Image (spheres, helix red, strand yellow):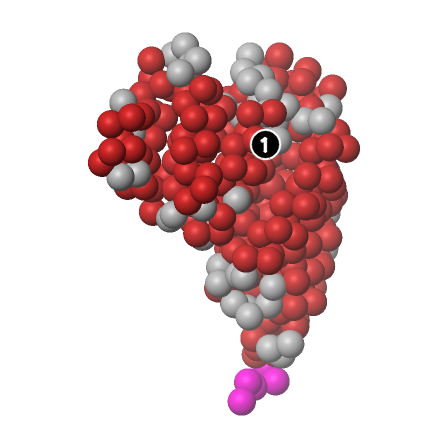
Amino acid sequence: MVPDSAKETCRNWFFKIASIRELIPRFYVEAAILKSYSFLTMSEFSQALMRLTKMILGIGDPLVSVYARCYLCRVGVSVAPNVRDYLYENLYDFLATYSQLTCVQVQNELLHQKVDYTAYVTLYSPALDWLLQCIAHKAPESLLSQIMDRCKQQCNRFAFSSSGLLLNSIMTAFRPEYIANRALQFVEMMKECQDSGFPKHLLFRTLGLCLIVANPLESQRLQILNEVWKVVAKLKSPSEYMSCAEVWIEYPVKHFTKRDRKSVV
């Protein structure tokens, strides 16, 4: 039983936070003490998480906003592990604002800061990886299909060179078995990603790590290796080549017979 004085103190703190004018400080302070809603009611978490999710839409910088989403999901899974609606909302809101990654304002700021666009895109990976990992936790394979369809809609709509960012995070977050069942589909999508966006060698390395621990369809195993190696063999940077080769060299060892390995060599 929570005393009335504790409830009143808790309400006062949240009223004080609501009076903070600046959006980002107000968001982070409230998210940091979100667990205190337990003094009021346990049913408050779902509404508070969704409200904070909508609040992030007011953050103009896409890199700042994605890390705000990352922090909110980090807090959310600790205080309300069974609430998932806000997780999907955060991902779909990120996809809806995906065009900001290539907007004129971002491009001008990158030129001013002398930051390479490829390096800039990779900064999104940790936050997006965490967001998708929260969604993918104990998720069925059908959810992967649903999310990939949403991502395809966004990529086809804006024709992003940075669509590799989404593919890499999806492969990192979901179970390797789910990725292996669609390995050839992922290879085709990764080949279409432009080199000016997310580093292509990281995509093929991530896929290779999934296929080392999970079995792709037997009828597609050789075709997958051939398609991947066509891309890997064209990598000009020694470090990029080695980062892929050290992973994919295990692929035929794991999935091919001794006779097949000899023919591959």
Rendered residue at 46%/20% (across/down): 231
Residue 46 visible in the displayed image: yes
Highlighted magenta segment, given as a residue range = 1-5
* Residue bearing the label numbered 1: 189
**Towards the viewer: 100 or 14:** 100
**Towards the viewer: 144 or 40:** 144
Q: Is residue 63 placed above or below 142 in the rendered structure?
A: above
Rendered residue at 62%/12% (across/down): 111
**Towards the viewer: 185 or 67:** 185
Binning the other alpha carbons within 10 Å of mark 1 as few (below 14), some (14 to 19) or many (20 upward) gives few
Q: In this rendering, would 191 be left or right of 103?
A: left
Q: Is residue 130 placed above or below 1 in the rendered structure?
A: above
Q: Give the percent coordinates (x, y) of residue 201.
A: 44, 24
Specify the principal SS of the magenta part. loop
**Residue 2 lies within the magenta run:** yes
Label tally: 1
Q: Secondary structure at mark 1?
A: helix
Rendered residue at 72%/37% (across/down): 154
Which residue of the protein is positioned furthest toward the top in this rendering?
A: 236
**Residue 37 lies within the magenta run:** no
Q: Is residue 156 placed above or below 218 in the rendered structure?
A: above
Specify the quadrant that holds the C terminus.
top left
The amino acid type of the residue labelled 1 equals Met
Q: In this rendering, would 86 be left or right of 264?
A: right
Q: Give the percent coordinates (x, y) of residue 50.
A: 69, 60
Q: Is residue 262 placed above or below 233 in the rendered structure?
A: below
Picture quadrant where residue 89 is located: bottom right
Rendered residue at 54%/21% (across/down): 118
Q: Give the percent coordinates (x, y) of residue 234.
A: 44, 13
Which residue of the protein is positioned furthest toward the right in this rendering?
A: 157
